[in-house]
Amino acid sequence: MAGENRQSEVRFTRTIGLFSATSIGIGAMIGAGIFVLSGIAVGYAGPAAIISYILAALITLFTALSYSELASSIPIAGGGYTYVHEAIGGSIAFMTGWSICFGCMVSCSLYAVGFAEHFLEFFHSFGIRDIAVTIIGIVIALFFVLLNIK
């Protein structure tokens, strides 16, 4: 009945395997910056850019190992927010969750800017003007919007 108070336990199905989880993690850690900014980094630093990539990979390795240890210790869905909530709780976890969300929004925005620069350069190499590139971009964006409407 509508007035009944039903309490049921919600269970998440774990459908992501080891390969998928590893791929998602590597994609999130590497990001698009390595593809968009490598030329600029090599232009400024020269061969020393390789050393900076090695140092960044080392730091990323420690971050990945820390997250894997936390994930095995706290097997609850929720990622970074859940780990902080279990360790410290309350308002710090709230701030962590929103910081992660904000960081993802900024990252996606920067990925879009980098993609747009390469997109423009690609079409300019064929002599296509900016207005035509804008129309092509709008059509592609609408295609993906329509593709994802259920």
Image (cartoon, rainbow, N blue to C red):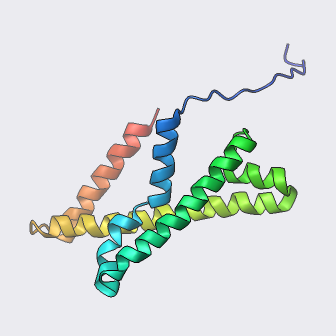
Report the front residue among 94 and 120.
94
Up/down of 60 relative to 19, above or below:
below
Report the front residue among 43 and 138.
43
How far across and down, in percent of the image, does residue 143 sit? 32, 44
Up/down of 149 relative to 53, above or below:
above
**Residue 125 located left or right of residue 83:** left
Can you tell which quarter of the image residue 100 is in? Answer: bottom right
What residue is shown at x 36% (from left), y 82% (from top)?
48
What residue is shown at x 52% (from left), y 32% (from top)?
17
Point out the residue furthest to the top here. Answer: 1
How far across and down, in percent of the image, does residue 37 sit? 35, 73
What residue is shown at x 21% (from left), y 70% (from top)?
121
The quadrant of the rendering that contains the N terminus is top right
What residue is shown at x 9% (from left), y 65% (from top)?
126
Q: How many marks?
A: 0
Point out the residue furthest to the left here. Answer: 127
How far across and down, in percent of the image, does residue 4 sit? 90, 18
**Residue 5 located left or right of residue 142:** right
Can you tell which quarter of the image residue 9 is in? Answer: top right
Report the front residue among 38 and 6.
38
Q: Is residue 106 in sight in this rendering?
A: no
Q: Is residue 145 in sight in this rendering?
A: yes
**Residue 37 located left or right of residue 16:** left
How far across and down, in percent of the image, does residue 23 sit? 45, 45
Can you tell which quarter of the image residue 42 is in? Answer: bottom left
